[in-house]
Image: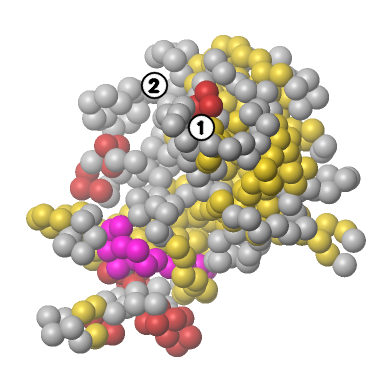
Amino acid sequence: MAAACSWVLVDSKAYIDDDTNGSTAEEFTNTSNHIGVSLWPASPPIPSRLSVHVKWMHPGHEFLHEPKILCAADCVFLLRVAIGSISTRPTYKMSDYFIYQLATSTGPLLKLLPHPYPHLFRDDDVGLLPRDDDFTIAALTQPSYFKFVLYLFKSEDWYWTSREVLVDPPQTPFPEPLPPGRRHFGHVTSSVITIGSRGAIGWVDLWNGILLYDELPDDDNKLRFVPLPVRLESHGGHALECCPKPYRSVSVLGDCLKFVELEPSGDRLPGKDPETGGPNIRVDDWTLTTYTNCDITGDPDDWKTDFTVNASNIRIDTAMRSGLLRCGMLLRKTDNSACEATERNLQNLWTYQPVVSLNGQGTVVYLITSVKVRHPKACLLAVDMANNQVQAMAMIETERSTDLWLNYFPCRISTPAA
């Protein structure tokens, strides 16, 4: 059977589950616990997930936290798993790092990596570049003002290296005033992308730009800076003070970068919401804008605007409206507890984390929507930007995380095909 390439939206938090399937691969941890990893693919907007199960574990040991997918690219996943004594306080030094590969000549494969300690880095700092049967893992840190340190792990060498790298050309000061504590030349990585056709890994600061590392030549000690479009009108003029993950994302489609921005409009109301305990926010509307960059240089003019849609103008056909009504997205309870379907529209929903589809021309954007901040019920919507309508929807679980970002990320995988 041949392998067919498709794409999925993956939950970055792996599930702890005993079920296995044809994608299951097994390996031992550093403490000799025997684990397995499986992929459970689904077609977007239904999220896919990875599960980790224990085949054998030392008595008194347990998962110290939920396993996490640090990054993924083209059928290769990097996971962090921590298993230890119940009485032990978990630390990064206790985590094991695994590579899970779907498409190998012998089937799915799970490999334990040498621990990167003492080169500790944040989960968001790590990227992955598959190279046929090999791969490169890269993590970028900024220990001081202009200093960047790149940590590399190449599968053919099977050990970690590190070196200082420079940004070329040097970053220019940010064009807007910055809040206290944020540096003009500081790079706060929100996500890491892989441009496989160019052999490059990019660390994305969603308020600023992308630092690109070209795998070849591998002796190059320079990073290229690619600025992002600057639009700071939203968020009450305090955009740079908040986390950008709920509002912006960068994806790779073929040889091009895709950037999407969500700008909500509304108002923060006094107090907290009595139902969720979260912020009490009135949402009046929200706007989605997508951009494409196929040149990927340091010129801000490389970004071309594709589409801009307002939620108040997005069409919802009868089937989609019925689905949104059934899951409670368009229902609002009145004082007498009656449900009035006409009282809430799409533009009044709390909406966040836009992600561009990796299919076709990238005209579809997936995003999470709920009636309130931190509400346990949520939907993943697919909005067709070219035709200005809701294309698909699916209910999702939010019990594991009711923060502003659930971190579903797009990823290409291979699936068996006849």
Mark 1 Cα within 10 Å, few/some/many (few <14, many 20+)?
Answer: some
Residue 379 colored in magenta in the image: yes
| Residue marked by disc 2 | 185
The amino acid type found where label 1 is placed reads: Ser
Choose between 154 and 344: the one closer to the eye: 154
Choose between 102 and 83: the one closer to the eye: 83
Q: Which structural element holds mark 1?
A: strand
Q: Which residues fall within the magenta stretch?
A: 370-386
Q: Is residue 241 left or right of residue 71?
A: left
From the viewer's perspective, is residue 361 above or below residue 311? above
Give the quadrant of the C terminus. bottom right
Residue sitting at x 53%, y 27%: 94
Residue 238 colored in magenta in the image: no
The amino acid type found where label 2 is placed reads: Phe
Residue 85 disc label: 1
Asked if one can make out residue 142 in the rendered structure from this viewpoint, the answer is yes
Residue sitting at x 35%, y 28%: 174
